Amino acid sequence: MAEEVLSTRVAAKLPIEEVQRWLKTDALNGLNEADVRTRSVLHGFNELLVEEKEPIYKKYIDQFKNPLIVLLLASAAISVLTGQLDDAVSIAVAILIVVTVAFVQEYRSEKSLEELSKLVPHRQIFARDLVPGDVVTLNSGDRVPADIRLFEAVELQIDESSFTGETVPARKSTSQSTVGLDLKSLNDLKNIAFMGTLVQRGRGKGIVIGTGQNSEFGDVFGLMKAEASPKTPLQKSMDHLGKQLSFYSFAIIIFIFLIGVICGHKPLEMFTIAVSLAVAAIPEGLPIVVTVTLALGVTRMARRRVIVKKLPTVETLGCVSVICCDKTGTLTKNEMTAVHVIASDGTEAEVSGVGYLDAGGLCTVRGEAVIGNSHPQISRIIQIGCVCNSSTVVNGELRGQPTEGALIVLAKKAKLFHVREEYKITEEMPFSSETKWMAVRCYSATTNSPAVYYVKGASDRVLAMCSSYLKNGQTKLLDSASVEAFKNDAKRMASSGLRVIAFAEGVAMSDLIYVGMVGLLDPPRAGVRESVETVRSTGVQVKMITGDALETATAVAQRLCLCESGNNFALSGEDLDQMNTVDLERVIGNVSIFYRASPKHKLKIVKSLQDLGHVVAMTGDGVNDAVALKKADIGIAMGTTGTDVSKEAADMILIADDFSSIRAAIEEGKGIFNNIRNFVRFQLST
């Protein structure tokens, strides 16, 4: 039955009829019970293979695996054998203090992480009995239970931001993806719904093509499990020190023993003396000081709302030379916000405030606030965006499409949200990936004005539907010069990384009046720019990795001072695929932006930097970040927006998703590193 294994990229290229034949299923009736039982045996349950949780005693025993602890245990054993019980007891007490402090601190961090997970409960458990060939129906709010090849999609929009890094929900269709595409990026698979993503709008139906470990989600999970977490610089240094001390201790024992025997002393007496000197040379206080110093650092970080899972992680931050940051949800809020409005008469407005809360935000024209119809041209645009809209924002929480949510918040800032209740919609033409516009036919319930069409969409499509434009309250003929001017407005906003939405109105769809456009942005998180500048001033490089397009990535990077025009350049996921290890290592130092990057690309970037000798920190919140988070010297996940997979892979979790905590953590790490280094020098010199 090997023919039943069907990858997402192959399925995306095939007609749905061919997919049915390949999987021996029927889109109408699905599989019968006998087929399900057979395929359950072949493919297993639709779940990921997770290792069982280690028992507490095992975690305690693991603390004894430190080479210095092993050396001290050997010293204690030898002290007992030679009758030096006082030394044996003191060494044993020191060992117990070290392992207990380390165990308690890591256990507390684990419990904190469990409590954090309870704050974001699962909405739905994946259907573990699904097998390839089953037919699944998707509705708004559903979590996609497996990789699915869609054969029905009605206004289906799926939030794939945690998977692909794309801010805007993916609009799904049923057409096969064969139009000259290599389909290297998951963003290209428009007819595939991926396991673990969230349906934001519409409905769909499709055939299961991948479950559990054989899904794209499972592929990422498998990559993460395959990557071993590297030892921290402190662990490497302490391992090296432990080996050196062991070597010198044995050398001392052998040297003194041989000299004594040669000089005529009794062998047993010389062995006892040699062992005593070797034991005395071992700094039994070193593990205590190191462990307590790290534990205090972890406690201080906890006060800053940062969970550190392993003690040595804190010191690693002090050695970090490169931070690789995921853009969506880490550097930015993953909340679309209207920031700029250009009316058809040339009037421009700036919009303040970020996210889906309107409190404190204003829409202003030359410093004057837009309140109601105080600025008719701008107000007209905002009104259309509010009425021609199928999403809602309640108490700062979006229910629907991010672009529409931003337009609703803009209306609230301009005190125009009430028009949504005043206008009654009689007809709606929803947005589609083919038309790239949405329209409603509506009328005002408070006036006797005739019904009108409100339209919003891509600027080129909306302008093509217009025959005139609005200027100072009058309609003007839309000639080629005007069209070119409006297109230049759109290009100007797009070059700044803004998503441009154009607006029009009219009594007939064949005779629309162009009104203006709005630029939207996924805004950077508060304090990120200052934190990036501070971190870079200490010599740490900051690189941004995203699944977004180049224009969006560059605009965000410039806002955050991650790059200066002309001095840095960007690499795409496709560029990375074409580069071997040597080529990438040659240029990676000058790259500030990696765009259209997949989980495998992120892993390749981290490995390349580590091969060059860098200590790499990786931040992220999505499934697509998990592999790189685990491979990095220190993985940093977001506590609030982060997925469970990213938190599992990370070494450190920022509870409040505050990037500035990384700056504080680096400072903490540098202080701890210096303290430990100074104490080691003191101990060894005495």
Image (cartoon, helix red, strand yellow):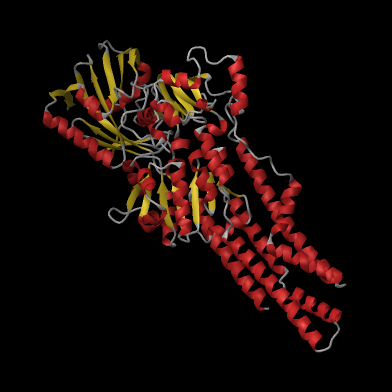
Disc count in the image?
0
x, y percent for residue 111: 67, 44
Q: On the rendered image, what quadrant is the C terminus found in?
A: bottom right
**From where the camera sits, is residue 93 visible?**
yes
Question: From what the image shows, is residue 420 above or below residue 542?
Answer: above
Tell me: residue 105, above or below residue 392: below
Report whether 142 appears left or right of 269: left
* Residue 303 point in image, percent of width and height: 60, 51
Q: Position of residue 325 (x, y in %)?
A: 45, 48
Name the outermost residue toward the right.
Answer: 83
Q: Residue furthest bottom?
A: 263
Say whether residue 502 is left or right of residue 212.
left
Residue 642 visible in the current orientation: no
Instruction: Identify which residue, 180 or 377, lies in the foreground.
Output: 180
Query: Which image quarter is the N terminus in?
Result: top right
Residue at image position (52%, 21%) is: 133
Seen in the picture, residue 442 relative to 541 is either above or below; the reply is above
Give the left or right position of residue 629, taking residue 287 as reference.
Answer: left
Residue 204 is situated, as x and y percent measured from the top left of the image, at 45, 19
Indicate whether 3 appears above or below 426.
Answer: below
Towards the viewer: 234 or 533 = 234
Residue visible at 38% across and 23% down? 173
Decide which of 5, 226 is in the foreground and name it.
5
Residue positioned 86% across, 69% down in the render: 81
Q: Is residue 586 left or right of residue 503?
A: right
Asked where in the image residue 168 lies, by quadrant, the reply is top left
